[in-house]
Image (cartoon, rainbow, N blue to C red):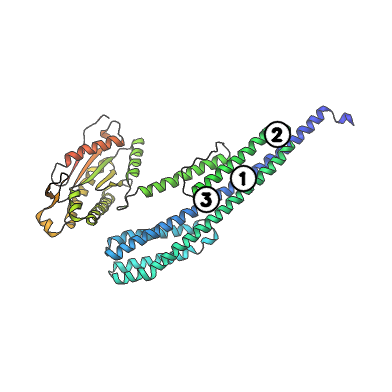
Amino acid sequence: MNSYFTVTKKVAIGYLVFFTFSILAVGYALISLQEHDRRTEHLVGGQFQAFTLLRDIRQNLLGQENLEKQLIILRDTQLLILLERRTTDLERILSSLKSSPLPRYFKNLPAKAVEYSTQARHLAQVSTEGDWDRAASISSITIEPLRKQLLADLADLRIQHQTTLDKDLYELSLQSRKAYRMTLLITLIGIILSAPAAITVIVSIHRSVKALRKATHDIAAGNFDNEIDIRSNDEFGQLAQDFASMALKLREHEQLNLDANPLTRLPGNLTIDRELEDRIARELPFAHLYIDLDNFKAYGDHYGYKHGSDAINMVGKLLKEVVEQNGGENDLVGHIGGDDYVVLTDLERGEEIAKAIISSFDSRVPELYNKKDLKAGFIMGTDRHGITRSFPLLTMSIAITLSENLDHPSVLEISNNCARMKEHLKRLKNSNYLIDRRKQLT
């Protein structure tokens, strides 16, 4: 009998046992990791998408409410364009609900939202016909109760969804703990040689689950700046990269929404600078049009905030219209703030667009003044030194910088160049544009 249990055989049997249980441990761990990865991807792809949809619908409804009130009070058909865009955006969101893997308790939301969208279209039609009394009645009696009910339903859905998400996360944590215990149990059988590797796997799983769970809660709470402490190259490492990429996209989306000018809804400084830096980095030639209104402060002081805001909004719409008609597909219209705007276009289109902008603006300036001031050709106001004097009617100055004339173009250099041209343009009468065609070494 003893001849059958030599040291060599015992070592062989020991290694066979070690190998067998190691295979079992590794196999079980991989299966658990795959299931964990599948469920986590489900959370990322379905649950977080639901949060985004709820937020977008709520913001859309609140935006429509604001525009609707302005429309009823001001009876300005120009507001219908913005209101119809909001309605179109809502319908687009609703269409995405049909193809999204959302929980069952979302099933009643599309029907109510579609009803609301239908009534909003009805309101737009009545307003277009000029029946404002009927429009006000539809708004207060039909649409407002629907909107309040939708907002209440959205609030309830968010609470219910958060509860479901917490439950799923808890179950995910339980699954991870179960995987941890079973892997540890199997690994302990081959502890002599497998202990170091087993401990490394266990600690890695535990740390990864903890980090992913924290990241999940942070992203669900709207914190997109957290860093996931997972440096491995396995599924968890890939999932961490996916989390980071998703958080970056959500943060960029949020920043773009916050960056948009609240009056004109045109992209603001952040978007403009990013577009400039991207074109510079890719060495794409472009024309940078800096647009400024002359004598706007005097106009605002004379006519008041409301008329000043209307003028700013009018110019924003005008720029979009001109660029859509004369610009290219990748052109950008931005609103720096106040009466300052930016247009980015191709080199060959810069001057043509500047001429079209000035022509369109000059033709609309009379709409901004009363008959008395328009006939006089000026308004009385106080300058920055407190001296009362006459100010000409609004004009426009456009400073055009061509990237090909800058040896090393940068956002700062373009800004400084525009400031120099603007100072010269301000001394000229009427609306003017100026192209800096000088080759500059920066």
Of discs 1 and 2, which sits in the foreground? Answer: 2
The image position of residue 365, as x and y in percent, is 18, 54
Q: Residue at x 63, y 46 (%)?
A: 176
Name the residue at 59% across, 48% down. Answer: 38
Q: Residue at x 46, y 63 (%)?
A: 152
Picture layout, residue 333 above or below residue 201: below
Per the image, the residue denoted by label 3 is: 45
* In-front residue for pair 198/122: 198
Task: Tell me which label, 2 or 3, sits earlier in the chain.
Answer: 3
80 and 59: which is toward the camera: 59
According to the picture, the residue beneath numbered tag 2 turns out to be 194
Which comes sooner in the sequence, label 1 or label 2?
Answer: 1
Among all residues in the image, which is located at the extreme left? 376
Specify whether residue 102 is in view.
no
Q: CA distance from mark 2 to mark 3?
A: 37 Å
Residue type, label 3: Gly
Which label sits in the foreground, 2 or 3? 2
Structural crowding at the residue carrying mark 3, measured as other residues with C-alpha within 10 Å and reported as few (<14), some (14–19) or many (≥20): some
Q: What separation in Å lies between label 3 and label 1 (alpha carbons)?
A: 16 Å
Q: Which residue is mark 1?
A: 34
Residue 420, image x, y percentages: 21, 37
Mark 3 falls on what kind of element? helix
Q: Residue at x 41, y 60 (%)?
A: 91
Element type at mark 1: helix
Left or right of residue 6: residue 340: left
Please identify the quarter of the rendering in which residue 88 is found.
bottom left
Q: CA distance from mark 1 to mark 2?
A: 22 Å
- Tell me if residue 378 comes above or below residue 212 in the rendering: below
Q: Is residue 417 left or right of residue 99?
A: left
Which of the image's four quarters has the C terminus?
Answer: top left
Name which residue type carries label 1: Gln
